[in-house]
Image (cartoon, helix red, strand yellow):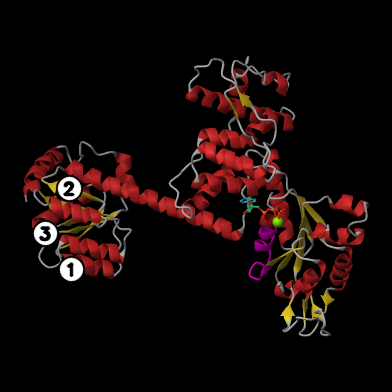
Amino acid sequence: MHFLSQARGIRGFYECTNGELPWKVEGRHKAMSKRSILVVDDDQSVRSYLSDFLTSCGYTVECAESGDQAVARLTAGYVPSVIVQDIVMPGINGIEVLENVKRINPAIPVIILSAAGQTKTVVEAMRLGAADFLVKPFEEPELELAIENVVEKQKLKEEVKTLRRQLDSYADTGDILSTNPKVLKLKEIAKHVADTDVPVLLTGESGVGKEVLARFIHTHSLRRDKPFVKVNCAALPNDLLESELFGYERGAFTGAMNDKPGKFELADKGTLLLDEIGEMTPHLQAKLLHVLQDSEYSRLGGKKTIRIDARVLASTNVNLEENVANGKFREDLYFRLNVIRVDIPPLRERREDIPVLCNYFLCRYRDRYKSTVDEISPALMDSFLRYDWPGNVRQLENAVKRYLILPDMNMNLSELKDQTGQSGAAPVVVKPKEDNMSLKDVGSRAAEQAEKELVLRVLEETSWNRKQAARRLNICYKALLNKLKRWHIDNRHSMQSAFTKPPAVKEFQPLPF
Ligand SMILES: Nc1ncnc2c1ncn2[C@@H]1O[C@H](COP(=O)(O)OP(=O)(O)OP(=O)(O)O)[C@@H](O)[C@H]1O
Ligand SMILES: [Mg+2]
């Protein structure tokens, strides 16, 4: 084999440097130490040479003297980190080995060793999914680098897989993604009360995550293996809602052809979420109160008593106290449901969650929409950070989905504007000092202005406690002080003075948020 003579020259150098390869890097070899390589070659001298060389690089090496032997090892469950294989071999040739690898475990990368004049076969191998190829003669560093690259790629793939799995399990368990201290506190409260059966009233604007929190309580309770059932009290007319909640027996009313269990029964030993409880009619409020007091009821048209064993959670985006005050909601039912109250803040009051949630939605929906977008563009993120999100997390989720489908920013922004029908809070209008200001300048200026706004808002919210503000902004204290110094801001400054707008020359682009 040609490459051996050339490689042995380097080997000679390797030997005369007391075993230290000139390109060897300590840390790198340590990191590789657990990776294993399967060498497939019918030539004994090639096998033993590659085995020695790769072992000296810190890999564990196994050799197969034929394609058949390699396939048999893989079929028996051996999973090497990389396969380095020859193309021309008696019996199963390299291409057939590759096909088998892709069938048995497509995640194992294969590096092909080819000879000059085998271009067609190499192209075929790459088409079949070979990770790389080397043409003999090659030098040892080339082989080492090729292996390192595929190992690195493999590692990244594994990391992405693990992260995806974590995100999926996050979605399954209904965790609440937030870095906001208020929300984190609510999460703690929710965990504390999860194991008790006390009713919890979840309040907050539409789309803030009331259902997410309700599921979180359920998955942290002893009822987690039993059903979580949701009833939307606003979606059904009174009669239908009653039969939905309590079920009915055959013949209970015209059209009741069969017995039907209600949601209370379906949620037996689990959790029942009464969503949009504020929309329930007085008649049904009265019935619900009795049922909750007695912990039992009968299906419509039925005589059998059914005991309730469902933990009841209720959620609403209307002001129930106001409804109690003006007689629209029963006070006794309100007190029964409102044993523990969890009020989720709107997204505009926890803007630090916007990037976190964006990344989460990006990972969650990228594959579904077959998108290659791997980050929210900085300009769009700036706009997101300044927008008021009247539709809260749900609206942000939809905006990210749109961005994945229509990554063209302008299109995405106008879509979002159309969707809300409003432009949110007073937008920060970016006005360039000069007409010929570059797009990059405008971008960084807008970013800085958004950053400044967020920093100031958090400072105001923490009564200018800089340490606390730095923690909330997820930056170190010193970084915060540097920013304030750069912007000439001290706590005597009001938001207004910090936002003194530059003299307007020509309006550049009113950001649509
Ligand atoms: N903290 C969060 N982490 C991840 N996703 C979230 C979070 N909060 C909300 N969401 C997502 O936002 C959307 C709206 O959440 P949810 O349905 O819980 O809101 P809601 O307050 O019940 O809204 P509504 O009042 O309209 O019923 C859902 O798709 C949910 O998955
Ligand atoms: Mg809801």
Q: Quadrant of residue 48?
A: bottom left
Contact, mark 3 vs mark 1 (Cβ under 8 Å): no
Q: Identity of the amino acid at label 3?
A: Val
Residue drawn 66% across the image and 56% down it:
212
Q: Identity of the amino acid at label 1?
A: Asp
The tally of labels here is 3
Q: CA distance from mark 2 to mark 1?
A: 22 Å
Residue 68 got which mark?
A: 1
In the rendering, at what x and y percent does residue 303 appear? Answer: 84, 85
Vertical relation: 493 (above or below) 366 = above
Q: CA distance from mark 3 to mark 2?
A: 14 Å
Name the one closer to the observer, 141 or 173. 173
Residue stretch rendered in magenta on the structure: 214-228
Name the one closer to the observer, 466 or 176. 176
Q: Quadrant of residue 400?
A: top right
Helix, strand or loop status at disc 2? strand
Q: Nearer the viewer, mark 3 or mark 1?
A: 3
Helix, strand or loop status at disc 3? loop
Q: Within 10 Å of the Cα at label 2, are there few (<14), some (14-19), or many (20+) other Cα atoms?
A: some
Disc 2 marks which residue?
Answer: 134
Name the one closer to the observer, 215 or 303. 303
Considering the image in quadrants, where does the C terminus appear?
top right
Lateral position of residue 434 relative to residue 463, left or right:
left
Disc 3 marks which residue?
Answer: 88
Q: Identity of the amino acid at label 2?
A: Leu
Lateral position of residue 418 relative to residue 311, left or right:
left
In the rendering, at what x and y percent does residue 158 appear? Answer: 40, 53
| First reached walking from the N terminus: tag 2 or tag 1 | 1
